[in-house]
Structures are given as structure tokens and as C-alpha cells.
Image (cartoon, rainbow, N blue to C red):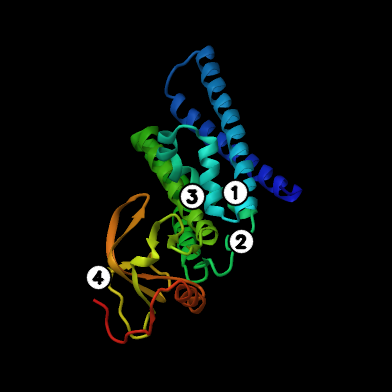
């Protein structure tokens, strides 16, 4: 682990916990100012809060160290993160319940200190350039954050601190989620092994597809209309340039969405020619684009 990486991660951890501490302090002021509490009650509350922050700070440090160690050893960022979660959270149930939220915080706040996610050419394929993740994040952030303090103050005045903080926290989480998408798109490439295609699109969708289930892979024709009712589509706005046809329906899953089972998928990759070449080397049939409409 390099000194520069350690300094970057330490800086990000400090910023994260200072921000979290400020948010908790504002919450305490907002909620508790309406209630009469004695000094020792507030001292207990403050001690519990500080103790939790210290514990979380140490756990975050452990998680980042394990993730970096395994990334260097295995050259797979996605696998390194999963290994770090398993090493940091011993309870499988707790890990399952918190996995998406922890990955969201990691990609939103810490991943930018690391190098690019594509580390194995021929086996990993980026879709960052053909994704609109950054544009979506900027739209969400600019449309919500400037007005959030005024909305919070209005709701707190009219409805009390409870509804105001629910709206504020959900809004902040949506911004953090889309920021995480920007980095997850960069760090979670589509991967090919000798037997599987591991499809990823940020933290939104994923599928582990046996190569034997891919009947054909082809380019998307310029005049082709892709209808989401007839096949799986990579998230809205991304440049779909590859169509995969399956022998049996394949499951696509998302953390906050119901599973989808589809016989075809239109996905995005930055280098479709290289992608097709590697599929062909693994015995997958590669066809030409089909003109016309896709229903």
C-alpha cells in the first residue's frame, strides 16, 4: 500500500466523519431543542454518538486496508471489495443487509482515490464512456442540493423535525447514490472468464451469465429501435451497442429493483470490437447487426 494511497484514504475518512459528525450534531440540535433533557442525558447521548463514530472509523480503516491488499493480489476490484466486506463484517446476515449501503458509501466517498477499474485487458471491458452516469449525477445534485436547506427549514417549521429530516436524509442519500454510480461504473467493468460473462452496470444491475447460454452476440444496428418490453436494456441514457441473445431467460438483478428474466439484452461497452473478439475466442457465436426495429 503506497504512502500516497494511505494519505488520500486518511483524508477522505476524516472528511467523511467530520461531515457525518456535523450532520448528527444538526440532527441533535433540531430534535432535542424541543425537549427538556438534563445534562447527564445529553452527556450519555453524546458519548454514545462519539463512541459509535470512533468504532466506525476503525472499521472503515480495516475495510479499506483489506480491500487494497486483495486488489493488489487478485487484480479484481469487485472481488477485493466483496472479500473486504466478508473480512470486516463477520455476520453473513448483517453483511447481506448492509452490503448495498456500504458499497454505495465506498464508491461515493473513497473510490476516487484509487486507479482505474479496468486492470486486465481481454478479460475486463469498460462501459464508462458510453454511460451517462456523470450527467445523471450532475442533474440530480444541481436540481436538489441548492434548495434542500430551504425545504428542510420550511418542513421543520410547518411539520416538525421528523418529516423534515426524513426528506433531507432521503434527498442526501439519492445524491450519494448517484455519485456512487459514477465511480462504480468506472470500477466495476464487465468481465469475461472462460465460462462466464459477468455483466455489471455500476451498482444498478448485474448478471452472471454462463457463456454456454449465449446463443449469439451482435452489434446494434444504427436504424434499430430497442424496446425495453422485449429485452433487457442497460440503464436509461447509456449507448447500447451490443445485443446478446440467450438460449433461456437470464436473470438480471438490482439492489432496489425486482429481478428481470430476459431472453435478450442490449448492453453498453466502450470497445465493442474487442468485446466481440474475446467472445469469439471463447466459442460464442458473433453475428452481424440486424436492420429494422426490435420489438
Residue 262, position as x, y percentages in the image:
28, 64
Q: Secondary structure at mark 4?
A: loop
- Residue 110 is tagged as 1
Number of the front mark, 1 or 3: 1
Instruction: Please name the residue shown 54% across and 31% down the image.
Output: 25
Q: Residue at x 56, y 54 (%)?
A: 77
Q: Dots 4 and 2: beta carbons under 8 Å? A: no
- Residue carrying label 2: 116
Mark nearest the camera among 1 and 2 is: 2
Q: Which residue sits at x=35%, y=49%?
A: 256
Q: Give me the C-alpha separation between circle 1 and circle 3.
A: 12 Å
Label 1 environment density (alpha carbons within 10 Å; few <14, some 14–19, many ≥20) = many
Q: CA distance from mark 4 to mark 1?
A: 38 Å
Q: Quadrant of residue 186?
A: bottom right
The disc, 4 or 3, on the residue closer to the chain's N-terminal end is 3
Whole-number angstrom distance, CA of label 1 to CA of label 2: 13 Å
Q: Quick one: label 4 or label 2, which is nearer the N terminus?
A: 2
Q: Name the residue carrying label 4.
A: 230
Q: What label sits on residue 176 in the rendered view?
A: 3
Closer to viewer: mark 3 or mark 2: 2
Q: CA distance from mark 3 to mark 2?
A: 20 Å
Amino acid at each position: 500500500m503506497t504512502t500516497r494511497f494511505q494519505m488520500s484514504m486518511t483524508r477522505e475518512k476524516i472528511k467523511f466523519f467530520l461531515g457525518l459528525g456535523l450532520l448528527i450534531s444538526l440532527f441533535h440540535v433540531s430534535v432535542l431543542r424541543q425537549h427538556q433533557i438534563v445534562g447527564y442525558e445529553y452527556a450519555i447521548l453524546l458519548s454514545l454518538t462519539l463512541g459509535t463514530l470512533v468504532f466506525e472509523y476503525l472499521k472503515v480503516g480495516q475495510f479499506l486496508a483489506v480491500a487494497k491488499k486483495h486488489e493488489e493480489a487478485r487484480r479484481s476490484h469487485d472481488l477485493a471489495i466483496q472479500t473486504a466486506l466478508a473480512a470486516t463484517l463477520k455476520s453473513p446476515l448483517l453483511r447481506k443487509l448492509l452490503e448495498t449501503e456500504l458499497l454505495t458509501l465506498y464508491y461515493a466517498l473513497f473510490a476516487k482515490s484509487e486507479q482505474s477499474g479496468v486492470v486486465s485487458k481481454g478479460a475486463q471491458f469498460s462501459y464508462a464512456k458510453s454511460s451517462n452516469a456523470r450527467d445523471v449525477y450532475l442533474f440530480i445534485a444541481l436540481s436538489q442540493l441548492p434548495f434542500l436547506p430551504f425545504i428542510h427549514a420550511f418542513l421543520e417549521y410547518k411539520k416538525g423535525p421528523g418529516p423534515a429530516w426524513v426528506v433531507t436524509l432521503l434527498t442526501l442519500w439519492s445524491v450519494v447514490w448517484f455519485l456512487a454510480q459514477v465511480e462504480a461504473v468506472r470500477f466495476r467493468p464487465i468481465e469475461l472468464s472462460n465460462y462466464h460473462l459477468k455483466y455489471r452496470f455500476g451498482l444498478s444491475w448485474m448478471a452472471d451469465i454462463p457463456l454456454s447460454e449465449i446463443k449469439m452476440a451482435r452489434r446494434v444496428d444504427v436504424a434499430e429501435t430497442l424496446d425495453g418490453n422485449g429485452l433487457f436494456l442497460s440503464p436509461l441514457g447509456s449507448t447500447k451497442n451490443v445485443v446478446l441473445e440467450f438460449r433461456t431467460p437470464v436473470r438480471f438483478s438490482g439492489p432496489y429493483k425486482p429481478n428481470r428474466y430476459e431472453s435478450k439484452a442490449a448492453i453498453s461497452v466502450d470497445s465493442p470490437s474487442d468485446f466481440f473478439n474475446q467472445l469469439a475466442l471463447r466459442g460464442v457465436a458473433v453475428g452481424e447487426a440486424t436492420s429494422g426495429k426490435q420489438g
